[in-house]
Amino acid sequence: MNNIAPIVDIRDLNYAVGGRPIFNNLNMKFERGKVIAVMGPSGTGKTTLLRLITGQVTASSGFIEVAGENLMTLRRRGLYALRRRMGMLFQNGALLTDLSVFENVAFPLREHTDLPERLIRLLVLTKLEAVGLRGAAELAPAELSGGMGRRVALARAMVMDPDILIYDEPFAGLDPISLGVILRLIRRLNDALRITSIVVSHDVQEIATVADHVFLLSGGGVAASGTPQELRNNPSEVVKQFVGGLADGPVPFHYPAANYFEQLLARDRAD
Amino acid sequence: MRDAWQSMIETLETLGREVRFLIRLLILTPAAFLRFNLISAQIYNAGALSLVIIMLSGMFVGMVLGLQGYQLLRRFGSEEALGSAAAIGLVKELAPVMTALLFAGRAGTALASELGLMRATDQLTAMEMMAVDPVKRVVVPRFLGGVIAMPLLSAIFAAIGIYGAQLVGVQIMRVDSGSFWSQMRASVALSDINEGIVKSCIFGVACSLIAVYEGYHASPTAEGVGRATTRTVVTSAVVILFLDYLLTAAFL
């Protein structure tokens, strides 16, 4: 590829929760300046991957580097310094319910900077304008629709001008119009602010229109990776099942269970 | 037997975690005073919003005290001592304990459910992701708000309680007003008032700690938030009454 260091570099990463392995020798490299999609069936650890990248959890073994910082050895202070360079959009927006929309977007600025009120106002209003919600500045988070809440959260995530913007399931539960708005914002912000965007999603069609590179996670590792076009032409069964939305395949429809007939014919458990 | 042993160990573990949480809060306390507006908002939430229930309860407790005290003291022909009996009972015992119990029910549950819901809706995680320590930004101001509000509420409870006792004793039961007040002034010593202040300060720390601890560590579900709120009230009540006994014994 090119010789610029990747912004996220994961090598031979292992991670387990309560003895159940989530990732086995995971290897991923995220290029700078790209929109990178992480997809995969539910339960493959997409959200866990985000938590690893943002340092909310620590891997059992392996190597993970984000923006030049080794997360395996980074202490709390260093982690907080790194997080100032990341913006994260939570699935439900996670707006602070006791603050207005304006104050929500201003929150990181007030916490981390000593800027004069006029400058904070300017910064917040420009970010809100970018997501089309300048008019909603004085509303409370409870008065917003789901899509609007997520756009406010996006304005908040980018108010500190991060290097990386992370989206956790940004399309879940949105109507087609809001979805289109978020989709276009992801691309536009990525290019205008020259940042790297990491999008976790399982909306295959939607993500294919914005992503530069797609990772498909399955069974504790990367099942496939490439441009959306490459993924569509990938012959692997897992990829076919996921992209085609087939009910059964390598990812089974049934949760592991005892023999069906035996269970049906067995006497009542209470006996 | 085995279960009892197990639950005792669990209780001790919880106590240990709460103490560690308290130490963490205390370490962050000096810096929190630099942003006093955050604390004053919480004093308003925990204190000013509890005023009505504290004043109403104080009034009724004082009135009951006036009535019962009058009935009891009349048997010995010493109704004039009603003022000092009511004042000492309120200042040393009833005001700190009743205020703490009411505080746990009114402000403690509000704190616990607020923090629990912030946890359940990812607001606390979002703060961590914005490189803001939620303990420092959210928990410590709430804790300090409760700690500061409690002695003030307790003082108001005692004052209103004495007024209530006076209302029944002097206005209705016709105890002599002059002896009511002068006996009170003569018998209530500074040490009695100190005892009340120390108690309410310690109850303030205990109640606020239990509320923020339970809320902050609630499991992020509707059920978890509910359980955190319940545990706040139950634990607070037991701890307050237990501490009250210890403190009373210590002051003798």
Image (cartoon, coloured by chain):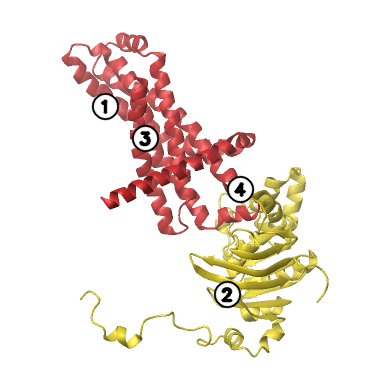
Vertical order, B225 against A44 (above or below): above
Q: Earlier in the sequence, mark 3 or mark 1?
A: 1
Chain under label 2?
A
Q: Which residue is mark 4?
A: B133
Q: Nearer the viewer, residue A209 or B214?
A: B214
Q: Colour of chain A?
A: yellow
Q: Residues within 10 Å of mark 4 (few under 14, many from 20)?
A: some
Q: Are marks 1 and 4 on the same chain?
A: yes
Q: Which residue is mark 2?
A: A220
- Left/right of residue A6 with respect to residue B198 in the rendered view: right
Label 2 vs label 1: CA separation?
68 Å
Q: Residues within 10 Å of mark 1 (few under 14, many from 20)?
A: some
Q: Which residue is mark 3?
A: B240
3 or 1: mark nearer the eye: 3
Name the amino acid type tagged 1: Val
Q: Position of residue A207 (x, y in %)?
A: 66, 77
